[in-house]
Amino acid sequence: MLFKETLNLAWHDLRAKKGRTMLTMFGIQWGLTSVVMLVGWGVGFQKYFMYEFGKLGEKLIMVYPGRVETGLGGYRAGRRIRLTEKDILALKTTNYPYFEYITPEISPGFLTVKYKSESRSVHTQGVFPQTLEMRNFSVGQGRFINEEDLRQGRRVCFMGANIKNRLFGENKPAVGEYVKVNGIRFAVIGVSRSKGEQLSVWDTLDDDKLLIPFSTAQMLFVGTPYVDRVMVQVTSRVYADQCEETIRKTLAPLHGFLPDDTEALRVFNISEGMTEMERFGKGLQIFLGLVGAITLFIGGVGVMNIMLVAVRERTREIGIRKAVGAKRRHIFLQFLVEALVITFPAGGTGILLGMGLSWLLSQFPLPRFFMAPEVSPMVLLVAFSVMTGVGLFSGTLPAIRAARLHPIDALRYE
């Protein structure tokens, strides 16, 4: 009953100063909108880049041959490392438990792919069947390269979505048709679902590639035992760093370089990159959240100033209430509730406005690397926690000051 009376009294007092109250509530509302959108942007940024890294293969380690930085055991510095399938076998025979797949890849480069009158220069790669999972390809039509294609060196190809559309058009099916790759006839066995834009860190987009069996590429277009890179998929991102260390230690004695020679093997560890991106994303969320919280606390200072003015204006009222029996806790509760009555409705409106603006932004096509705020339960929890903290912060000091007023001094105040 006491709380209900206090709430009614607080509402009556705030209505008496409508203009001042509305301006103060606007500051709180805008602050909460800022918190929701800024923290949401941090979450959206992290989610976007994690998704983009995932397109490449979230548990993938790519090993490229480099040059030996320092001489070792009679080997000269600056010597070029050349990887072969023997290196693949060496990694597999370590029986290291956290290696899931180990495959080589070769790239004959940009080959001329022709279908009837249409001709394109296409980035072509020789791959293994495991590439489908390792590189997060998804079959849109037909099938992917299989073990029989690899074993028999079949002249078959799997097309990226963009290449298929450029050669065949969007509506004409490509599976079952034949194309010429540098003049050699290949059967189209499958087309990938479009990955769209991605963080292409080493070559073209996956939608712009033509994939053929590794053995076929080696036999028809390369003619050497060397591979361009070794692809390693780990069982879990947790073990990515350990796996990278094992790769270096295994291949170092085979090629005469020190395991810590980072120039001999250039390793792109996507798992490590995703972990770093997670850390960066969380840091960005904290930073943006603090920026929004500062904006909100400025609004909270406004509430506190309004409440301090209210205490001074109503000093005689406080004295009368204390004279007729009101206790300190009653006065304290009245002014604290008034601050919360300002904060929570305004804050709730601000949260809803932030959610609405975030949703509205998500409905429009945005430039690459500019993502709409992501409104998640965590974002709402942060916003509600900050709102509660601001309400308590802005109301506590004025409530304490009001509660400590002595009745006689309050009644003498003019």
Image (cartoon, rainbow, N blue to C red):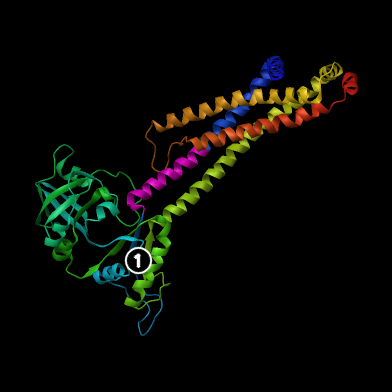
Q: Residues within 10 Å of mark 1 (few under 14, many from 20)?
A: few
Magenta region: which residues?
39-58
Left or right placement of residue 53 versus residue 222 in this view: right
Q: Is residue 406 above or below residue 99?
A: above
Query: Depth check: 53 or 336 in front?
Result: 336
Residue 401 placement (x, y as % from top left) = 80, 29
Residue 252 occupies quadrant = bottom left
Q: Nearer the viewer, residue 287 or 167?
A: 287
- Residue 48 part of the magenta-drawn span: yes
Q: Residue at x 29, y 54 (%)?
A: 134
Quadrant of the snapshot with the N terminus:
top right
Q: Is residue 414 visible?
A: no
Read off the residue under disc 1: 96
Q: Secondary structure at mark 1?
A: loop
Q: Compared to 216, does 28 lie above or below?
A: above
Residue at the image point whose x is 80% and y is 20% from the top: 313
Task: Say which residue appears at 20% left-offset and 47% top-offset.
Answer: 163
Magenta stretch, main secondary structure class: helix
